[in-house]
Image (tube, rainbow, N blue to C red):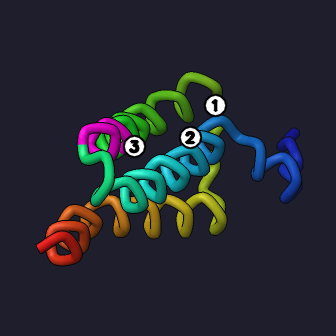
Amino acid sequence: MTQVVTASKVLWYYPNIIGYIRFILMSAAFILARTNWQVAIACYLLAFVGDVIDGYVARAFNQCKPTIFHSLLEYYSSSIEFKAPNLVAFWIW
């Protein structure tokens, strides 16, 4: 028997929570880039680590179900994560 997954459950999957934290960290890195670059780099690196571990967490907690929400969250957060250093460098210089 298959388990029904509701939208409210998917929002609180551990990999999605990691994705939310990644967005917060990337936003903080962008905001702090001019004033405190050391903290900005730390936030960016933590966001990158979150990108690495969210797949492992999804498999460990059996939350690998393909949902459109997670697919979009992963796509946009990874897209921003890899374009952010270029944007910050352009913004600073």
Residue drawn at 64 percent across, 31 percent down: 62
Give the magenta part as a residue range: 38-43
Q: Residues within 10 Å of mark 1 (few under 14, many from 20)?
A: few
Residue lying furthest top in this view? 60
**Residue hosting label 1:** 62
In this view, the residue in front, 41 or 23, is: 41
Label whose residue precedes the other's in the sequence (2 or 3): 2
In this view, the residue in front, 50 or 88, is: 88
Residue drawn at 24 percent across, 67 percent down: 88
Residue drawn at 55 percent across, 49 percent down: 19
Helix, strand or loop at label 3? It is helix
**Residue hosting label 3:** 47
Kind of residue at disc 3: Ala
Q: In this image, 10 relative to 27: left or right?
A: right
User: Residue 54 location in percent, x, y?
Assistant: 48, 37
User: Residue 39 location in percent, x, y?
Assistant: 33, 39
Q: In this image, 59 relative to 93: left or right?
A: right
Label whose residue precedes the other's in the sequence (3 or 1): 3
Residue 83 location, quadrant? bottom left
